[in-house]
Image: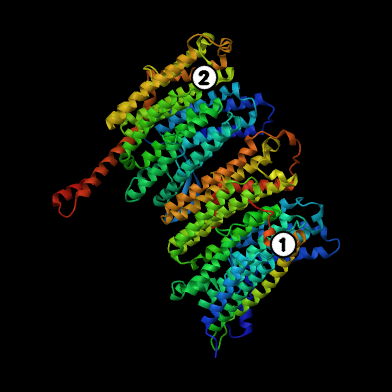
Amino acid sequence: MDSLTALTFLPLVGALIVLAMPAAKEKAIRLVALATTLVVAVLGIATYLAFDGASAALQGTVEAAWFTLPYIGGGEGVPVHFRLGMDGLSVLMVGLTAVMMPIVILSTYGHIHTRVKEFFVWMLVMETGMLGVFLSMDLVLFYVFWEVSLVPLYFLVGIWGGANRLYATVKFFLYTVAGSLVMLVAIIALVHMTGSTDIGRLMEMASNTDIVSLENQSWMFFAFALAFAIKVPVIPFHTWLADAHTEAPTSGSVLLAGVLLKMGTYGLLRFAIGFFPMMALQNRELFMALGAIGIVYGALLAMAQTDIKRLVACSSVSHLGFVVMGMFALTETGLRGSVLQMVNHGLSTGLLFLLIGMIYERRHTRAIADFGGVALSMPIFAFFFIVSMLSSVGLPGLNGFVGEFMILLGSFEASPLWGTIGVTGVIFGAIYLLSATRRLLFGPLTRKENEELQDLNLREVGLMVPLVLLCVWIGFKPNDFLSELDGSIDALVVRIEAAETQLQLDETALFLDDSTPEPAVALVEAAQ
Amino acid sequence: MTFQSTQDAFDAAFSTAALPAVLPAVILSVGALLMLLIEIVPGARASRPIVVLATLVGALFANFTQLSDPAGPVLDGIYASTPETAIWGMLFAAGALLAWVYSIGYYGEKARPFLAEHDMLFLSAPAGMTLMVCSQDLLMFFVGLELLSLPLYARAAFRRERHDSVEAGLKYFLLGAFAAATYLFGASLLYLATGTISVMELKMMMGDTITTTPVFLAGAGLLVAGIFFKISVFPFHMWVPDVYEGSPTPVTTLMATGTKAAAFGFLIPISFLLPTEATGLIAAIALLTMAAGNLGALVQTNIKRMLAYSGVAHAGTILLVIAGYLASGRDDAIGEQALHAALFYLAAYLFTSTGSFGLLAMLERDGEDLTTMRGIRGLARRRPAVAAAMTLFMLSLGGIPATGGFFGKWFVFTVLVQEGMYGVAILGALMSVVALGYYLRVIVNLWMEPLDEADTGRVAPVTLPAGIATAVCALGVLVLGLMPGWFLDLLG
Amino acid sequence: MSIPTEHILILASLLFSLGALGFLLRRNVIVVLASVELMLNAANLTFLAGSRAHSTSDALSMEGPVFSLFVILVAACEAAVGLALVIAFYRQKRTVDLEAATELKG
């Protein structure tokens, strides 16, 4: 079996094994789940290392006939394939997923004690869903993975979540599905117009005005963008996220922040921008504005929170605002920074959620006011918390700095206004995160419960070390990771530039009428 | 149709070539009659299950042989066997078989002596449905419709000691009689306008000035309205939840799946009778039906009733393909595509709906309140397999991928999108979000609500027949969702 | 002298409308059943009128009369099932008023 198929479906195999095991054997179930994710992690890292970042071509492609959509595409029907493949964007996301999963599984030793078997079945199904989303190179297959991956999280939050979990999980599901179904109509329309479901070929055909008229491109772009914007989430669709994060069990939050939200930004980049670069250019200001507003609004929301987990959830909205803004700057720096920031956000927010989970397991409260002086009783915890927080704030030398810097640089090229507003977000971010850290860790130990807190054990330290190392690595040598993107982003930038020229030509063409002198018409036509 | 002599007429009508085409309907009718005989032959009662199984499997097989080598129009063109009708026929036989399997052990001691009568329905109903989809004229459809409906009215009231059952039967009967009368008056007007009741001849007339006369249009409208009653389209959906709730659950299963499918199987091929100007009207009716069904379902606490409303919403979704067909200017290719989309959708719906009603029938046996949202709370803890199957069915009804419901939705929307009806498609898609609202509630209650500790041990074990039927339904849902090509290949 | 088809059509439409209104407005099940019969007979009348309109001197248009025979047949079957249901309903409620059908709601 080829490596990408194995990578995608290995977790599902693990899920089936767990399903067949008796529910009472909790230790064995945990071990099987851990072993599966570790093997997937090794496979994922191997795939990552084997990837040639300089090339724009899809790598490791797998293709097998699945079925044929009848009628559409001129009688013959459109063949739908089971098609996997990866480019620079996919490979980073796959690497992130593969590395995060064993850590998430390890973290559950602390907080999942009921219905253990079901939990790991859903966890492993979730991993297949996420990898499938990042690796699918067929539009139908992508959509299947995209929606299927909703179901496990729905259960993870709904069964193992907090007091208000049912509201949160149904809200999450319905919000996401509403967007997805609008996208489904656009997907069907796109497949109908182009007669293909191959994402690679669609990249060329979807933006070709001879195949898909500008008018159709416009509504399809918004249909795609809506689905992904809800998932990211872009303001004003962010309300589900705060609820889902707050109610989810630690492992669910880590997964949500670490990987699932990236499905939204990934989709925006690959489909909304990748398929319809002209529309992306036309709506650049709108999305940069949404991103910038998200940065500021998320930060302001975070400042107002008294629950530390909700605070981090709101900071997610702010950080993802950066990603969206950088992406829609549509400049090379912006795009690269934005992809890197997806990884960064996964690492640093994942770390923060892990840490919050650890302290919650000890104190069963998340109210910031209940803490203070924790650094005295838990120095190791304090160390990791500070590192994660600084990575999130964007301290130079850590990963967050590189991403945010590139995004701001890219955004300034495209729109100084929104770039400037984005910068304020960095300042806000520093304020609320530092202030929360101070209230949590420093000051006198005012409460007796906090004095008796046990510091982190070996397992807990062990599961954070790889993430912290990655944060530092990206902080010092970002090019080791950015180089994976060279080929893909270059190709995308070329397409965006072509789209820009096309748009300008269209605009000029509008001014041409019968009164235009012949040479001018000829000039424009030649250019076209 | 006119003939020189009675002999000519007889030869034209009854040739041996017709036998393979009508064989499924014949097998089912013979089985139904046998079932009535069993009642009066002493000692034959024990063979009841054998007759049911043999008949339904025989019909399944007879339809299967028509799949690769359909006989086409036979019996002087009033009956036709095509790959589509063969698939419909197989679905009807399979649906009846599954519903019958779920009925094993459903009824209490009181009903035992009447079970042969009850089982007869599960043979006469698919016979009627087969006639309905195979019919090529308005009379044949009517005969099929009544063959299906008359026994169904009586079976809805099968638990006659119960008030709700009798009320359901009466309401279903009144609704059906009104629908039949509307259909008939429509048919008679069409006949008055054109002089024919043959679908083929009517189709050839389309485009003539005759087809724009008020009599013709009124006839077409009433005919279609009569069928709309049968598929519980807005505003004719009002009593449907009552009927579904009050009828014995295995009978409800048959009403919800087969009846609807058979009516659509005839409605889509004859929707050419409607003028293309009706596109907007049909689309509006379809969307209103979806809204009425979904909003009605949203507030239900009884799952059976909720599924009844959800069935209304699904009928609305399928109705969209007719709007798409009319929008194409009644293009034959689009008409075929619309039929295939509905066929796929209803195949998936048959498995999901049979499975979910069947599971309710099984739970109901243990105590009626187990079919309410409260009653299934925490069921996953006690019966994980039942809860998992129910979850799968709910996701399929909601159209989540990897289940048959997803591709059903895909094909229906494809018809619309091809005609540029993006707005209608998006509205339809958003309706499914509302629908997911209540499907998710079932899942929430099954898995996420804590078990009510008071009723420990009340739930009896899963019976073998119900288990097998559920497995078949679940498999059907998954195969249609993961390997839709297998089904599409049957359609050629 | 024969009656014009239009007149029969008008009569049939009146019968049908009367039946439909009776079905929708009356609450007595027996009357409701009778209303359905009216609707069916409207169809029968139209079928026969159609047959007359489309028959020529050497060929009868037989579909109409045959259809109406089937309608009469089915009407009889419907009456049998319907009245049985009405009796079962009456046994429980001691009335044939549809207002009493209140078991199922919501």
Indicate the amino acid at tag 2: Leu
CB contact under 8 Å: marks 2 and 1? no
Q: Residue at x 45, y 61 (%)?
A: B279
Say which element carries label 2.
Answer: helix
Say which element carries label 1.
Answer: helix
Tell me which chain the residue with mark 1 is part of.
B
Q: Residue at x 46, y 74 (%)?
A: B213
Residue B34 is situated, as x and y percent measured from the top left of the image, at 76, 65
Indicate the amino acid at tag 1: Ala
Check disc 2 and report the residue beneath it: A355
Q: Residue B154: give its label.
A: 1
**In the rendered image, which quarter contains the N terminus of chain C?**
bottom right
Q: CA distance from mark 2 to mark 1?
A: 65 Å
Residue A299 is situated, as x and y percent measured from the top left of the image, at 41, 25
Residue A255 is situated, as x and y percent measured from the top left of the image, at 51, 28
* Res A72 → quadrant: bottom left
Q: Residue A29: give its label.
A: none
Can the viewer see residue A38? Answer: no
Q: Residues within 10 Å of mark 2 (few under 14, many from 20)?
A: many
